């Protein structure tokens, strides 16, 4: 049995439908109409202890809903969730003792008392032994650079400070599992880096299982060895980031700065070369898009050099964001490899 | 097992203490609340003194009893402020209940600890001042020692009863989208049936009987009746026991409603 085990998990929300305008509002008083929206449409997922999983998908895909069922906040409509053998909703308190969570949009710090007081309150809530509390706190203060604002109340913190304090608060009791829902949203690069380092370290040193939702691809590349993509309530990919890149980021663009180029000859060459397409071409510069499984970069450059001098060149890899966007948009064929059945389509909005 | 119980009690204690700090951080709000309550007290005093003009007693109460009643009602009402009340419904409405659910704390006990914490600061001071005024100035009734002790106990029970009602009303917000209506309705019903608006003795017989059959009387009527020695010691003990029974019943009703309400949670923002 896996550490986190999700089986056929579904969550359905009921939403009121209101006809437009005042007449619609009046009508709603007498006869309410609802539609059931399937936010999570039957998910199966296994996560082992110590894994770092990026859980990504477009807005409204069901990411946060899944996390909230894992943390015991929401009750599943059907299906089961087990975290370390515990049902998080039924045994919320037992589960809560062993987890930590950061919801980027919402703070868990007490608003009107100093941050340091929040930490000491958490010490009492989680019954953290004095020596461990001291050790963790000192380490966290150093790693996250929190000396400057420990004495401030949470309402006075900047977003970056608040997020660091929130992260420290979530990990103070050495939870076995940490759920991070967009932990780097709206932060500058320096703070992001610090937060990522901190998360990585906790995973490495304590074997903390980490599940992270994010729209920041830097987070995924930096932190996670596993990528799970959800869309419209269903999983559409489960594998490594590398595999997605290898499989789907096949196209590269090479840009060459030219001197004395024979433009018609270049056109002619590349129109006949398989797997290569001319993006733009003029006397000073040529940009060529090529499929790296059909042509290598050196073949392309050699061909350019036959008809002109290459002063400089640069190769663009497609950003991972581009690849993931293509996955969301179902432009990529996900049938083989690690891809999962694209069953989510009809499930949404049912 | 014993150690575990002790330790988790410490968590709630700690929560209560942090909320006292919170209440102190909001001392201006607290002072404003106190002033507002005090103005109501003065208005009631003026109103009743006009009503009593030229009369010795009304519904079996003398002017001196009435004055005392007003002050005792003032103490009872100071217990849970508007701010404490809206904190519970606010958590549900703005979705921060989800953060509370992440903690290994019982929601009801945690809210009670918080309320107790801020009550010590907000209501406690008021109560202490007014009790001193009652006991050491003339013109007000003073209870004998046994009734005074029972009054203090009854005041404590009144806090439990009021919390039970406030908590249940707050939980209703899981099914509605606004708190103001619920809070106002709750306050209107409470001030009518608790005796804080008009002593229950002024009600027509059937309404008085109805009020005595409901939990609200435990908030003002019971402690006031004990303080003013309108009840014999046996009757007073009985009234106190009824108050405690209501407190326990409301606590369990709160548990029951919570277990249903928590399934209603839909947190906005997916």
Image (cartoon, helix red, strand yellow):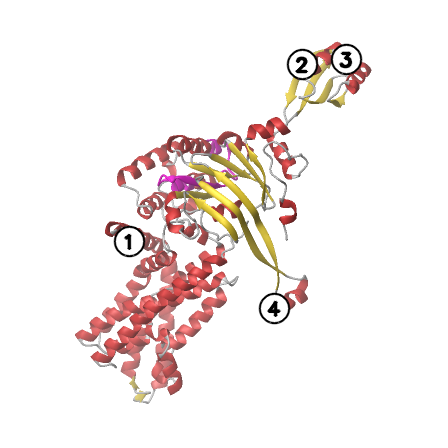
SS of the residue under disc 1: helix
Horizontal side of A337 relative to A104 (left or right) equals: right
SS of the residue under disc 4: helix
Residue at the spot 47% in from the left edge and 38% down from the top edge = A47
Tags 2 and 3 both on a single chain: yes
Single out the mark in the foreground, 3 or 4: 4
Q: Gap in Å between the C-alphas at discs 1 and 2?
A: 71 Å
Q: Position of residue A339 (x, y in %)?
A: 60, 35
Tell whether label 4 touches label 2 (CB within 8 Å): no
SS of the residue under disc 2: helix
Residue B117 lies within the magenta run: no
Q: Position of residue A1 (x, y in %)?
A: 44, 40
Q: Gap in Å between the C-alphas at discs 3 and 4?
A: 74 Å
Q: In which quadrant of the rendered view does residue A59 lie?
A: top right
Q: In this orientation, which residue lies closer to the viewer: B185 or B101?
A: B101
Question: Residue at label 3?
Answer: A261
Q: Gap in Å between the C-alphas at discs 1 and 3?
A: 82 Å
Could one spot residue B167 in this view of the protein? no
- Picture disc at residue A298: 2
- Picture disc at residue A29: 4
- The span picked out in magenta is A165-193
Residue at the spot 26% in from the left edge and 66% down from the top edge = B129
């Amino acid at each position: 049995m896996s550490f986190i085990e999700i089986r056929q998990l579904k969550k359905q929300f009921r939403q009121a439908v209101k006809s437009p305008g005042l007449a619609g509002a009046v009508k709603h008083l007498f006869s309410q109409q609802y539609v059931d929206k399937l936010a999570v449409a039957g998910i199966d997922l296994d996560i082992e202890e110590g894994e770092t999983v990026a859980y990504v998908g477009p807005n409204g895909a069901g990411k946060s809903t899944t996390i909230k069922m894992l943390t015991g906040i929401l009750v599943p409509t059907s299906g089961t969730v087990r975290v370390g053998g515990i049902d998080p909703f039924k045994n919320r308190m037992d589960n809560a003792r062993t987890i930590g969570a950061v919801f980027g949009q919402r703070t868990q710090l007490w608003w009107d008392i100093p941050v340091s007081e929040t930490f000491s309150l958490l010490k009492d809530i989680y019954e953290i032994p004095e020596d461990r509390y001291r050790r963790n706190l000192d380490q966290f203060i150093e790693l996250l650079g929190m000396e400057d604002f420990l004495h401030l109340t949470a309402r006075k913190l900047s977003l970056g400070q608040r997020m660091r304090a929130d992260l420290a608060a979530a990990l103070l009791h050495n939870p076995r599992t940490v759920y991070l829902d967009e932990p780097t949203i709206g932060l500058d690069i320096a703070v992001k880096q610090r937060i990522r380092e901190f998360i990585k370290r906790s995973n490495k040193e304590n074997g903390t299982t980490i599940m992270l939702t994010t729209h920041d691809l830097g987070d995924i590349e930096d932190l996670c060895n596993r990528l799970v993509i959800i869309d419209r309530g269903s999983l559409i990919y489960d594998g490594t980031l590398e595999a997605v890149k290898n499989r789907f980021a096949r196209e590269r663009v090479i840009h060459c700065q030219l001197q004395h180029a024979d433009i018609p000859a270049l056109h002619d060459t590349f129109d006949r070369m398989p797997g290569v397409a001319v993006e733009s071409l003029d006397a000073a510069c040529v940009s060529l898009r090529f499929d790296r499984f059909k042509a290598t970069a050196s073949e392309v450059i050699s061909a350019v050099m036959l008809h002109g001098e290459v002063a400089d060149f640069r190769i663009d890899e497609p950003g991972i964001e581009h690849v993931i966007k293509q996955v969301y948009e179902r432009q990529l064929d996900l049938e083989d490899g690690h891809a999962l059945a694209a069953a989510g389509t009809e499930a949404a909005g049912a | 097992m014993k150690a575990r119980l002790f330790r988790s009690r410490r968590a709630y204690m700690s929560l209560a203490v942090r909320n006292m700090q919170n209440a102190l951080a909001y001392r201006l709000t607290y002072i404003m609340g106190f002033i507002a309550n005090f103005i109501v007290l003065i208005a009631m005093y003026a109103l009743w003194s006009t009503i009593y003009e030229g009369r010795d007693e009304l519904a079996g109460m003398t002017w001196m009893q009435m004055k005392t009643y007003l002050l005792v009602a003032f103490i009872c009402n100071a217990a849970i402020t508007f701010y404490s009340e809206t904190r519970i419904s606010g958590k549900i409405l703005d979705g921060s209940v989800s953060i509370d659910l992440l903690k290994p704390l019982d929601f009801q006990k945690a809210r009670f600890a918080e309320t107790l914490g801020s009550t010590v600061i907000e209501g406690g001071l008021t109560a202490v001042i007014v009790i001193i005024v009652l006991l050491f100035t003339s013109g007000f009734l003073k209870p004998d020692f046994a009734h005074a002790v029972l009054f203090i106990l009854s005041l404590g029970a009144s806090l439990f009863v009021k919390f039970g009602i406030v908590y249940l009303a707050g939980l209703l917000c899981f099914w509605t989208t606004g708190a103001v209506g619920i809070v106002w309705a709750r306050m209107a019903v409470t001030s009518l049936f608790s005796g804080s608006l008009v002593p229950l003795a002024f009600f027509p017989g059937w309404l008085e009987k109805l009020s005595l059959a409901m939990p609200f009387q435990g908030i003002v009527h019971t402690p006031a009746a004990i303080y003013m020695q309108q009840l014999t010691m046996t009757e007073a003990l009985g009234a106190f026991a009824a108050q405690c029974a209501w407190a326990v019943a409301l606590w369990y009703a709160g548990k029951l409603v919570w277990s249903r309400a928590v399934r209603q949670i839909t947190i906005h923002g997916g």
